Each structure stands twice: as structure tokens, then as C-alpha cells.
Amino acid sequence: MNSQPWKFTFVRDQKTKEKLSKVSWINTEKVLECDTLIVLSRIDNLEVFENQIKEELPEAAVKYYKETIKPKPESYIKPWFDKQVYLSLGILLSACAEMGIDSTPMEGLNPKDYDKILELDNYATLVAVAIGYRDEDDHNQPSKKTKSRLNLDDVVQTV
């Protein structure tokens, strides 16, 4: 229905990145050293969402929401919003790769602290993505450090 229950906050300000880095658990270095940190949040206020779609979406989409989604409990609706944001995360990561921009998605952060630092009223942080261009000395490059992955046969099934 193209609901877009999200907000993307692009953080380039070093002072703000420093604040965020302190609540980014093991991702402190990534937050500090990236060119831009993109914080993906989902709308956290159903009334705000409903007003947004009423103003922005076609009547058929609003009807779909009212008949299919809204009757469900909030404990269903917000995770549905989360999934919408993660769909956009996939597109963001693909777009970065296509443009030759390195990206690192991170859930290793304290979402409530991110919300406070970024003053995200009516939104809740889900994930952040550090983007920039590769540092040739970065020890995490696949050519310098092999990634640990499960056996392909354990994660891919063909039916």
C-alpha cells in the first residue's frame, strides 16, 4: 500500500555522531569513522500514521489499512511497520552497493538513546547504517579477514 511508516535521519555532524557512538555498543568506531550515519526509524504513533496516510495515500490504500491492518492490535501493527522499514533497508544497502558506497547495517545500538539524541518525536529507531568509502587499511575487508559464515547448504534450500 506504499505506507512508508518511516523516517531516515542522515547524520554527518561529528558531535552528533560522537553522542550516538557512546550508545552504539560495539559499533562505536563505525559510527565515529563513517562519512554518514543513516538512522532508520519507524513511526511510533498510530494517530500520526493514520493522519499521514489519509493526507498522502490514495483512498484505496487508506481503505486497505482501515479494513485489514487497523482492526489488529498495536502489538501487530508496529512490527508490521518494522518490516516495512527493513524492506527499505534492503533497498538502501543495494543502492549503496550499486553506487560503490560501502555500508554496514547495525542493530548494535540503544534505540531509545538514539531517539533522544536525534529528538525523534513519534518515531522509534530500529537500525542504523554507516556509509562511506572503504579505508584501504581497514582490517575488516574480506580480502584481509575472511567472514565467518554458516555452510551454504545449511542456509539455502532448493525445492
Image (cartoon, grey):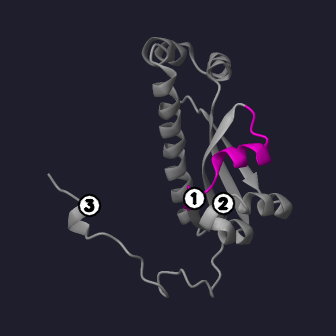
SS under mark 1: loop
Which comes sooner in the sequence, label 2 or label 1? 2
Q: Which residue is mark 2?
A: 24
Mark 3 sits on what residue? 155
Q: Quadrant location of residue 49?
A: top right
Residue 80 drawn above or below residue 32? above
Q: Which residues are magenta?
A: 105-121
Residue 120 found in image quarter = top right
User: Which sits earlier in the primary sequence, circle 3 or circle 1?
Assistant: 1
Instruction: Find the distance from the CA under tag 3 to the CA under tag 1.
Output: 23 Å
The residue sitting at 76% across, 43% down in the picture is 116
Disc 2 crowd rating (10 Å Cα; few below 14, some 14-19, many 20+) is: many
Q: Position of residue 82 (x, y in %)?
A: 52, 38
Q: Amino acid at mark 2?
A: Ser
Dot 2: element? loop
Give yes or no for residue 135 being in the magenta stretch: no
Which structural element holds mark 3?
helix
Q: Which mark is residue 108?
A: 1
Do callouts 2 and 1 mark residues in contact (Cβ within 8 Å)? yes
Foreground of the two, 14 or 115: 115
Question: Taking the image as drawn, is residue 132 in sight?
Answer: no
Residue at the spot 65% in from the left edge and 25% down from the top edge: 45
The relative height of residue 43 versus residue 14 in the rendered view (above or below) is above
